[in-house]
Image (spheres, rainbow, N blue to C red):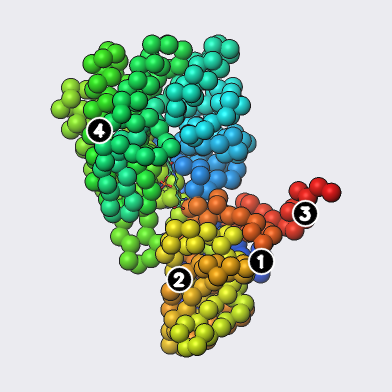
Amino acid sequence: KTVKRDDLTGAITVAGVDVNKIAEQHGTPAYIFDEADFRERCRRFKEAFGGADVYYAGKAFIATAIVRILVEEGLFLDVCTGGELAVALQGGMPPERLGLHGNNKSTSELSRAVEAGVGRIVVDSFDEIDRLTRIARDTGKTPKVMIRVTVGVEAHTHEYIATAHEDQKFGFSLAGGAAERAAERILAEGVLELRGLHSHIGSQIFDSSGFEVAARRILGLQAKIHEKCGVELPELDLGGGFGIAYTTQDNPAEPADLAGDLMRIVKQECAALHLSVPHLSVEPGRAIVGPAMFTLYEVGTVKDVDGIRTYVSVDGGMSDNIRTALYDAAYSATVAGRTSTEPPILARVVGKHCEAGDILVKDEFLPADVRAGDLLAVPGTGAYCRSMASNYNHVPRPPVVAVADGASRVIVRRETEDDLLRLDVG
Ligand code: LLP
């Protein structure tokens, strides 16, 4: 690991750089990106899934510098809006290594994707199939598409529920027959190139049981399409959702173990159904970027509330990490800039926003001498924190500082009040 505590000073260092120095140079709050760790995770996924294509899910966190690293590491990239597509192209991702998702892609997003030559568009509704077919006819191009199938499996952390049909906005239902009809329509029109089926069952999943049910169900559809239309679809995407440990209580499976389970199930099922094994792809976001970042805050007010607990306020909050407030997500925190021999006290780490629910870490033991000016690190904030950040209370969004080989560089600069004021007209 590149993140450690210095034996002498007790301060956390990242790739050899002391957090005190990072804070001095770049200010707080800041997202600190451990580049070597990110690259290592890209490689681990690629290795684990062997010949499968790994589409990094850009919604977890995307920036042009990230896209450049993904290009170097040979990953593919999943984007789900025109905005993410713009970053991907600007960052130099070859368009054929891009996949476009979304339940409500606009005609202009679809046109841009077709024009750019995006490698695959994951279609999500009959309406979209029609619009894309029109665009293909108008431009004379043949977009490659996958069908997003709702397989009736919902997985979160270590639990999953398999139901007959799902009441949600994404994809074509398998149980209701919509997915099959979508395939028939695309194949009958012959204007779009149907590459395969796609399933994404949830996020922060800890084991392979939900994926296994999903793979079995979707391969059942693959067999049906083969039987009815005489086509064996060449590709299959099993989505993302691989979980990470946010606290010491979490115990997610290793990518290699999940990959092994998944590939075994797909092979077994294909053999049983007399299908050839399709070319696999997956779309991990959180598991690649989540652990590769932490947020560095500075402590301000420390308040003991009637001896119940101590509220430790930092200079950020729900605008840079909404996950605790939104999902009741668990995080940890540690005093990062120094060591302390004081006994631990029960603390709650809160932000600076005008809202009682502005909590970053619900319960954490921090040293009793935690005080204003201390640096506080919250690990595991790489996924869905900067990407879901807001300007609530007109707080500018923090920068992302990449650290590698003893040096730090800004890859997303800090927003300023001027940036925010520029949007106001009149
Ligand atoms: N593929 C598709 C089609 C997805 O919808 C998602 C996530 C992913 C891949 C990547 O999933 P991951 O490997 O990162 O779990 N904001 C929530 C998570 C929303 C996930 C949405 N879709 C959170 O902060 O937990």
State the residue in front, 51 or 87.
87
Crowd class of label 2 (few under 14; some 14 to 19; many from 20; radius 10 Å): some
x and y, in percent, of residue 129 in the image:
47, 21
Residue at mark 2: 362
N-terminal label among 3 and 1: 1
Residue labelled with disc 4: 217
Helix, strand or loop for disc 3: helix
Name the kind of residue labelled 2 in the image. Answer: Lys
Q: Residue furthest left?
A: 272
Tell which quarter ligand 1 is in: top left
Q: Nearer the viewer, mark 2 or mark 1?
A: 2
User: Where is residue 351, by image quadrant?
Assistant: bottom right
Instruction: For label 1, count other residues whose C-alpha is less than 10 Å away and answer few (under 14), some (14-19) or many (20+).
Output: some
Say few, some or many: other residues with alpha carbon within 10 Å of mark 4 (under 14 / 14 to 19 / 20 or more): many
For residue 329, above or below residue 200: below
- Looking at the image, residue 384 lies above or below residue 101: below
Which of the two labelled residues, at mark 3 and mark 4, occupies the earlier sequence position? Answer: 4
Distance Cα–Cα, label 2 vs label 3: 33 Å
**Cα–Cα span, label 4 and label 1:** 50 Å
| Mark 4: amino acid | Arg
Which label was assigned to residue 27?
1
Disc 3: which residue: 421
